Image (cartoon, rainbow, N blue to C red):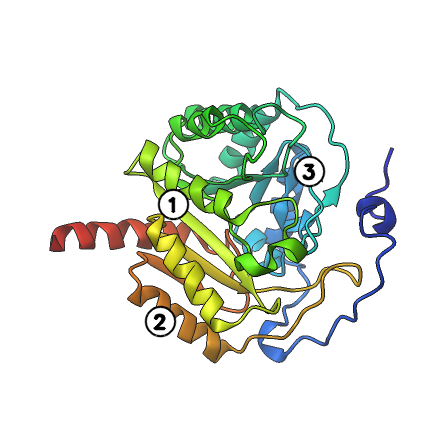
Amino acid sequence: MRNLSDPEQRHPEKAHRSDNPQPKKPAWIRVKAPSSAGYRATRDILRSNRLSTVCEEASCPNVGECWDRGHATMMIMGDICTRGCSFCNIATGRPDALDVFEPGRVAEAVAKLALRHVVITSVDRDDLDDGGAEHFAQTIRAIRHRTPDTTIEILTPDFLKSAPQALETVVDARPDVFNHNLETVPGLYPDVRPGARYFHSLRLLQRVKEIDPSMFTKSGIMVGLGEDRPAVLQVMDDMRAADVDFLTIGQYLQPTPKHIAVDRFVTPEEFQAYEKAARGKGFLMVSATPLTRSSYHAGDDFRRLREARAKKLAQQ
């Protein structure tokens, strides 16, 4: 049994890399350690249902705030990923077999937490023929059955090694929001996301709209990895060409010395400039702050996303 608290067992592909220094965080991205009663109540519900969350596995800085409000991003298909992206703190290795009872446990946790909006994500499962598409679909259906009024946002892997039908399986299950993150600019993919392909991920988002034009699509990137402004603006243009509705931009934070180094801390003023540029390019929703993550304030953002579409349609 692997001990995932041991960095060398958690990230065997990074164990022999040289350490990268971890710079001191500026004041605008420091957060308090989680300790509230709401945080503990959410943690206990997740533990009792034997569920993993990306909040913990990816060391999200917002876990205290979100869990205090009962909001957690469920991570299905285990806590071991078949990829070894240089930015990510999720464990890498050979995953266990899928748990057929997991969709039901996720739905039960959603009910116990009384979630009006839930985000479901997963590890990459390149070991599965469909990349886990049917498991996503089963989880969506289980939540719909248990809590019909809960809106569902999914944050999927890229299904790079799966047949095209895998994406159709997920879209046909009718999540309210389909999110797949591009993560960074294309020039940094070999260093940041070596197991992925930028234009495949972009095409995935475009295909969602082709299958179901009414479905909201969402994608995000990190900054502070060495990208420049023109490259970020080009990613925005690429997303809009794929008809992506919602863009998130957040600061990359280095999980351990073995992960890719932070190139710089992007200032709040630069994030504001990115948001202004993105809105000018036609995104329905933009969240661009140092602490922005894919599922941060997702429920409130989904409400605003629907309102923005309704306003746009009324003006046509």
Q: Is residue 249 above or below residue 182?
A: below
Which amino acid, mark 2? Answer: Lys
Which numbered dot is residue 217?
1
User: On residue 47, which mark appears?
Assistant: 3
Q: Residue at x 48, y 47 (%)?
A: 199
User: Mark 2 and mark 3 in contact (Cβ < 8 Å)?
Assistant: no
Residue at 69%, 39% in the rendered image: 81
Q: Position of residue 27 (x, y in %)?
A: 62, 79
Please tell me whether residue 80 is drawn above or below residue 225 in the rendered image. Answer: above
The x and y percentages for residue 182 are 51, 51
Query: Residue at the location (52% across, 29% down)?
Result: 136
Q: Amino acid at mark 1?
A: Thr
Q: At numbered mark 2, what does the secondary structure look like: helix, strand or loop?
A: helix
Horizontal side of residue 138 vs 149, given as left or right: right
Is disc 1 in contact with disc 2, using a CB cutoff of under 8 Å? Answer: no
Between disc 1 and disc 3, the foreground one is 1
Q: On the rendered structure, is 39 left or right of 137?
A: right
Residue 194 in view here: yes
Q: CA distance from mark 1 to mark 2?
A: 20 Å
In primary-sequence order, the first of circles 3 and 2 is 3
Q: Which three-letter amino acid code belongs to the residue tagged 3?
A: Arg
Q: Residue furthest top?
A: 100
Q: CA distance from mark 3 to mark 2?
A: 40 Å
Question: Which residue was labeled with disc 2?
Answer: 276
